[in-house]
Image (cartoon, helix red, strand yellow):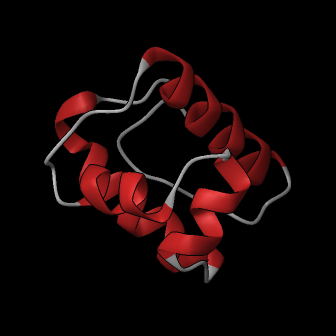
Amino acid sequence: MAIDDQNLPELIKEARRQLALSQEDLARELGVSFATVNRWENGQVKPSKLAKAQLDNFCAKMIKQGKLKLSGGDN
């Protein structure tokens, strides 16, 4: 799954909505702070390469488990 930088805030919000996760829950899953996830969603900052890879892997895992369905990507 490839994450498009332009749609990243919407993708994160949609993933959290489908998985019923708070920003804090997602932050814990990715090993980042709540504030970091909040800034990503608000488009204030973009994730680092490492954080983006963690997000990509997390979403791919959730898609494989049938818990997440995102549009506009490689899924």
Residue 20 lies, with reference to residue 60, above or below; the image says below
**Quarter where residue 8 is shown:** top left
Query: Farthest residue in the top direction?
Result: 49
Total tally of numbered discs in the picture: 0
Specify whether 25 is left or right of 41: right
Q: Nearer the viewer, residue 27 or 14?
A: 27
- The x, y position of residue 37, in whole percent, is 41, 56
Question: In percent of the image, x 67 and y 46: which residue is there?
Answer: 31
Q: Position of residue 51 (x, y in %)?
A: 53, 30
Q: Where on the picture, by quarter, is residue 18?
A: bottom right
Image quadrant where one finds the C terminus: top right
**Nearest to the observer: residue 72 or residue 24:** 24
> Residue visible at 78% across and 43% down?
61
Q: Residue at x 57, y 39 (%)?
A: 55
Residue 66 is situated, as x and y percent measured from the top left of the image, at 79, 60
Quadrant in the picture for residue 20: bottom right
Q: Is residue 24 left or right of residue 42?
A: right
Q: Identify whether 40 is placed above or below 42.
A: above
Residue at 26%, 33% (x, y): give it. Answer: 46
- Please tell me which residue lies in front, 65 or 12: 12
Q: Which x, y percent locates residue 19? A: 64, 74
Q: Quadrant of the N terminus?
A: top right
